[in-house]
Image (cartoon, rainbow, N blue to C red):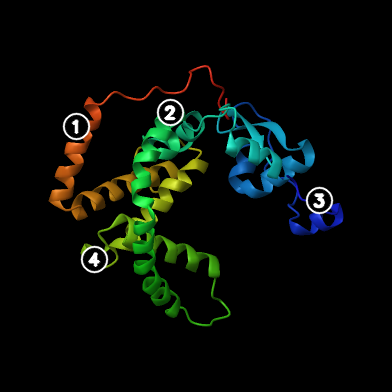
């Protein structure tokens, strides 16, 4: 349900400037405009074309669903009309291969159910007990400063917390290693806006940095995962491989991208 808002008030929320790099060239399309500022690009599209429109970026035609009502339909997906894999796979597939976010329908539900064991009430209570002192410790290190930027500080702090509490291995990390792991994860996420789409390690492209970041994450996990846990993981993998795979959604189901 949309929240009624006076148009004059809505204009005060965010006023993107005119598109600085608009282009209608083949293949390029709106890529330059989008890479320059994704948020401003989507605001302009919403005002010019409404909640649903096609745009051409990164060599593909995409359907943008913007605003609360369109997003509710896409995210709740009651008719199973949208799939994660085709869209996210194109953007970040090499760096989150077989990740839960890239799976769909019955297969997604199957693995999500397995992961729910880590989010039962006793485990959530355990996470909270571990998180509370770490949150206080991190915030206590902040100092009043006119130049202090809250978003980068919160982003860094939450990544530190996730690595320490959920990923594990922080206590075994060398000085500076957790920061490198956090940077590697961010690089993998930012690959979604990459224009030069090759996984050859290259510090000058988003996909190149993401490829390097993926290897850093793999090396960190391999080095900090206890041998016993690795043995259990291999056993589980063999067991899952022998188990019948749940049926995946129909191949005729439309995707949120095309």
Say whether disc 2 or disc 1 marks the residue closer to the N-terminus: 2
Say whether disc 2 or disc 4 marks the residue closer to the N-terminus: 2
- Which residue is label 4 attached to? 171
Q: Quadrant of the N terminus?
A: top right
Disc 2 crowd, CA 10 A, few/some/many (<14, 14-19, 20+): some
Residue 248 spot, x, y in % from top left? 42, 23
Kindly identify which numbered label has been placed on residue 106: 2
- Which residue is label 3 attached to? 4
Up-down: is 29 above or below 39? above
* Residue in front for this viewpoint, 39 or 166: 166
Q: CA distance from mark 2 to mark 4?
A: 37 Å
Disc 4 crowd, CA 10 A, few/some/many (<14, 14-19, 20+): few
Residue 98 spot, x, y in % from top left? 36, 34
Kindly identify which numbered label has been placed on residue 19: none
Residue 139 spot, x, y in % from top left? 45, 75
> Which residue does the image show at 58% across and 80% down from the upper left?
146
């Amino acid at each position: 349900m949309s929240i009624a808002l006076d148009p004059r008030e809505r204009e005060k929320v965010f006023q993107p400037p005119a598109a600085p790099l608009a282009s209608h060239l083949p293949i390029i399309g709106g890529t330059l405009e989008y890479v320059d500022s994704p948020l401003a690009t989507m605001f302009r599209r919403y005002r010019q074309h409404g909640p649903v429109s096609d745009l051409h970026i990164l060599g593909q035609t995409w359907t943008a669903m913007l605003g609360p009502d369109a997003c509710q339909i896409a995210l709740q997906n009651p008719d199973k009309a949208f799939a994660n894999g085709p869209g996210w796979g194109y953007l970040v597939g090499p760096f989150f291969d077989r990740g839960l976010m890239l799976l769909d329908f019955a297969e997604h539900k199957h693995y999500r159910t397995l992961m729910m064991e880590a989010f039962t009430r006793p485990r959530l209570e355990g996470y909270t007990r571990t998180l509370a002192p770490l949150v206080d410790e991190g915030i206590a290190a902040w100092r009043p400063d006119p130049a202090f930027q809250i978003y980068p500080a919160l982003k860094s702090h939450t990544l530190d917390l996730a690595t320490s509490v959920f990923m594990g291995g922080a206590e075994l990390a060398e000085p500076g290693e957790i920061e490198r792991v956090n940077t590697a994860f961010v690089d993998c996420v930012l690959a979604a806006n990459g224009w030069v789409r090759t996984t050859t390690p290259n510090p000058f492209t988003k996909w190149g940095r993401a490829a390097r970041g993926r290897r850093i994450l793999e090396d960190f996990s391999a080095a900090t995962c206890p041998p016993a846990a690795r043995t259990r993981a291999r056993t589980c993998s063999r067991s899952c491989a022998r188990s019948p795979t749940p049926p995946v959604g129909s191949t005729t189901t439309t995707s949120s991208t095309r």
